[in-house]
Image (cartoon, coloured by chain):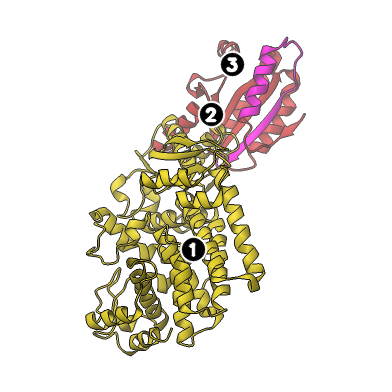
Chain colours: A yellow, B red
Amino acid sequence: MSTPSREIILAMKNSIVGDTYSLAFESCFNGLSTSSCNNLEEIRAAIRRNPEACVLLDLELTGTGINDLFVDRDALAKRAVLLFLGGEKSLIPEGIDPSGIHFLKTEPELKDLVAKMEEAFRISDLAAQFCKIAPHQLHARSRILPCNVFVKLSEGKYVKVMNSGDDFDKEALDRFLGKKIPYLYIPRDGYLSIMQAVLAEANALIEKPETITVQSAAAATMGVFHSMQSLFEVDGFTPQVQAMTMVSVNLARGTMKKNPKLAELLAKLDANRDSYIAWHSTALSFLSCKLATALDWKSDGTFYKLSLASMLHDLTLPNDDLAKVHDKVATGDVKPTEEELKVIVRHPIQGAQLLRGMSDEVPGEVAFIVEQHHERADGDGYPKGLSMKDISPVSALFIISHDLVDEMYRVTPGNFDMEKYLFVCESDKRFTKGAFGKEFREIMSKLKDL
Amino acid sequence: LERFQTPSPFGPARKDAEGVQGGSGNAAVALNYFINRKNAICVLTLKGSVANDSEGAFSACVEEAVKTPTKYFVLNLSGVAGFDSSGLRHFALFQQKLRQSATLILCEIPGDISNQLKTNGVVRDSEIQADLMAALQFVLLCEKKGGKP
């Protein structure tokens, strides 16, 4: 039988049954290792340790309190396979990606269990073979293609559209943009080589801070963000993606220490609007630090918290359209389905979950900033509908920066009018009504001075 | 006597056994054993020929296997090239010792050897399973019945 060199983690109520399964798997899959867990906490720790593991769970052991496991897996270990004995798909909480989660009847025949395990590995491996890349990113990075390029037709089905060695020139780029193809797919190895080049550029800037300009930092940060986003979608928030996050955070910190003018920031950011989430996260990182500087909160620690929150606050959203939705009633141009709306309402919690799962120690405040970035002055925000007394000043700053960046995106590049924005904010009392009081007013007043 | 303990002896042992059976195959290969244990389940894989001089290998195998409390012994005979009639008694005693403390299941017995063992009354039909998966499935069945075969 084919050989996934992966780990199977067994969590069975009857340890002898678990041991029997272990022996069966080891005899069928060469090179496979098995281990066992006795409770949910151990299982959660195991998939953090090995995000590619396959967990075989006996629902009799774990009970139904498994939501945290689903959330962990969704955020941190997307390639991990969960195979339940007992239960059914309705156990999967709303907003959780069900791919990679399988259900079998309790006490299955061994041959059925082994076959299911092999199928689960195959699907998981296939999904990991391709990484998505926006056409303009590919154009910017590789004129002569280092690998074949594919378009995704459906789950697990890809069709080749360009060959390795082809020239991905402006004409080719326009062809894909004209067909409204948001993402192309390239084999993982090819993607990793492009990603290494992106990281090398970013690290070169970080190592020589004197060479950082807003333009180079914005372009490099967006490049790194795209790579993070693609790998996150395939693998989850693995240590590799976490390390990339820190590269983009360090770039933003390095840039903001130079205290560039707001006008310069806006002009350079406006030049890179191809992907909403990447632009939005990069702009938010720069703008929130800029606003913190105006409030005289210009410590490196504050820049670190704001930049990290910026990079991760929308990472769990699957596409640009969902990131553009800002109200839980979805009054904007994008009309999400009911299911998508649930994903939107969950994403602040999922983003916070990423931070809490980071292997490096991260200040707890950063997770709260991410969790609260859609809360509102009047308590009408989401996911918790908090009021001002529950929101820290730095979260308040982030909420305003988030709104500001979103407003900037809505206008044609170069046409953003801060005076008009402040007037609108004042008119609709979006930050100043109710208990949201003076902290917000102070932050708003600083916007005029930037 | 060589003794081995490997994490997963199933593949290599099976391949070697095919080599022995498929070759000219007259030279008797001394009996070896492999142990793969998961707590209370112990898979013992024999490799080589069972003959009069196998007594030492069987004793060593039992001694090592019963050191840890065991509920099921799965005896994998896929690597056994042949049984000398003088070795049958040692094999019967070997099984007896394993049965004393655990449920014994035999599997992967090469066809000609199976006939020989049955004809000589050395094995019990109720303990024989076709292959390792069937043996492990039998363990699951026993567990379902509260640990009884």
Q: Position of residue A366 (x, y in %)?
A: 46, 73
Q: Judge whether A179 appears above or below B74 on screen.
A: below
In the displayed structure, does residue A249 sit left or right of residue A430?
A: right
Q: Position of residue B87 (x, y in %)?
A: 69, 17
The chain carrying label 2 is A
Answer above or below: position of B122 versus A345: above
Amino acid type at image mark 1: Gly
Disc 1 marks which residue? Answer: A357
Residues rendered magenta in the picture:
B11-40
Which percent across, then down, holds residue A156?
A: 41, 37
- The mark that comes first in sequence, 1 or 2, is 2
Mark 3 falls within which chain? B
User: At 46% across and 36% down in the image, what residue appears?
Assistant: A161
Helix, strand or loop at label 3? It is: loop
Q: Chain of mark 1?
A: A
Could you tell me the amino acid type at mark 3?
Pro
Circle 2 sits on which residue?
Answer: A1
- Residues A348 and A22: in front is A348
Spatial CA span between label 1 and label 2: 35 Å
Mark 3 vs mark 2: in front: 2
- The mark closer to the camera, 3 or 1, is 1
Describe residue A175's horizontal placement relative to residue B11 as left or right.
left
Q: Amino acid at mark 2?
A: Met
Disc 3: CA contacts within 10 A as few (<14), some (14-19) or many (>=20): some
Where's residue A226, x and y in %? 49, 56
Magenta stretch encompasses residue B103: no
Q: CA distance from mark 3 to mark 2?
A: 22 Å
Any mark on residue B110, and which? 3
Quadrant the C terminus of chain A occupies: bottom left
> Residues at marks 3 and 1, common chain?
no
